[in-house]
Image (cartoon, rainbow, N blue to C red):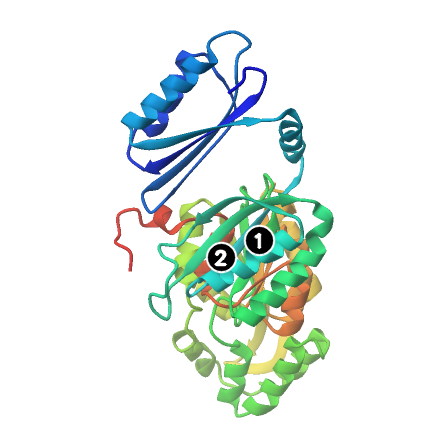
Amino acid sequence: MTSDKAVLIHFSGHDHPGLTAELTGTLARHKIVVLDIGQAVVHESVSLGILIQMPASGSVSSVEADLTARAHELNLQARFVSVPDDSLRHWLRGLHKQHFIVTILGRSICAEHLARVTSIVAANEMNVDRIDRLSGQLSSHGPSGNACVELAISGDDAREPAMRAEFLAAAQQLSIDIAFQRESIFRRNRRLFAFDMDSTLIQGEVIDELAKLAGVGEQVSKITEAAMRGELNFDESFRRRVALLKGLEERHVHTLLRTIPLAEGAERLIRTLRLLGYKTAVLSGGFTFFAHHLQQTLGIDYVHANELEIVDGVVTGRVIPPVVNGDRKAALLAELAHKEDISLEQVVAVGDGANDIPMLRLAGMGIAYRAKPLVRQSAPQSISSLGLDGLLYLIGVRDRDLHPHEPLV
């Protein structure tokens, strides 16, 4: 080592408590300036890197000797590399690069998935700064298991649009999900989750189920599918579908509260968000009778949906205005953010249909959940391989944070 150069010290070996304290304590006794530090543990194997600046005075050889001896006592290998000035300047410039988070999600994650994602990162001249496993395991552990790896990367933000397209294509080919978002203070401080209801929080479309009860299921289903694909104006298609429900008895309407199940992971997601202090909202083009049922069941804070008009115990075939369409959802999202005194960057919106696109684009994080192709292509993020609780990974929640004492399954 030389005293006029920065030095990178790399320690590696079997991990056990106290390693970092012992090594940094040795540096402290020599009054060493630390420029950077990073540590990772994989399967009880530790890798610790410390970038230091040697003091102008003092014995360089004594610092190296002390650290080497201490590392040997701790059963670690120590390696010392002088860092040239141009390399140090390059590192300093890198501190000002744009930083991103890439999240890989699936029922299991294998080497092929990791290779594809990191190849895209490398091809776009981005650097992988950190890799973390957020799920309990990465291998397949049941049809409802979750696997997640998070990569922190940095580089030129001009590559962002191309990378988004490449990640979307890779996700479709590999049957996984790849989320790509900018690292920022807002990513770590989301405060409100707003959900579509039908085919998002619940498994099905309420209006389609009502139509089956009214004997017009096939007619309504065709209109619904066209509307969700964005082929029909929502307001017109909605009025046409509701009109077909005319004459349905109210007692049949409420039977759906017991027959339409929650989406996979919905209860765990909402429960966790409430635990973490998030506000939650349902902004739905569906109906208030079901949305209020979810509000009571899950403890959702806000509900805005369409009110199905019922007179003398019979559905009239009309809704009470205003209709909650795509534009109305976006406006309500902005109103809720203002009411909660938060930035729209702190809002997460989740939906599956074309009428959700305005709010998905408005929110700081818009997520197309098990959505139609048009919506997946239009939304900033798209999740299809996991249940709703997989969204927790996108805000950095680890499985062990929620179940620190439970065995892995």
Residue that extends furthest to the top in the rendered view of this protein: 57
Q: Residue at x 54, y 18 (%)?
A: 2
**Front-lying residue, 152 or 7:** 7
Q: CA distance from mark 1 to mark 2?
A: 10 Å
Across and down, in percent, residue 315 comes to 55, 81
Q: Position of residue 218 (x, y in %)?
A: 57, 91
The residue at 52%/89% (across/down) is 214
In the structure shown, which secondary structural element does the residue marked by tag 1 occupy?
Answer: strand
Sooner in the amino-acid sequence: mark 1 or mark 2? 1
Q: Reply above or below: 268 against 10.
A: below
- Mark 2 lies on a secondary structure that is helix
Residue 281 position within the rendered picture, expressed as x and y whole percent measured from the top left: 53, 56
Q: Quadrant of the C terminus?
A: bottom left
Q: Nearer the viewer, residue 290 or 3?
A: 3
- Left or right of 8 on screen, residue 94: right
Quickly name the residue at label 2.
Answer: 391
According to the picture, the residue beneath numbered tag 1 turns out to be 348
Q: Nearer the viewer, residue 354 or 400?
A: 400
Q: Residue 1 in the image: x percent, y percent?
A: 50, 20
Contact, mark 1 vs mark 2 (Cβ under 8 Å): yes
Residue occupying image coordinates x 31% and y 37%: 15
Determine crowd level at label 2: few under 14, some 14-19, many 20+ residues with C-alpha closer than 10 A: many
Note whether residue 321 is visible.
Answer: no
Q: Which label is found at residue 178?
A: none
Residue type at numbered disc 2: Leu
The quarter holding residue 377 reads bottom right
Residue 118, image quadrant: bottom right
Amino acid type shown at disc 1: Val
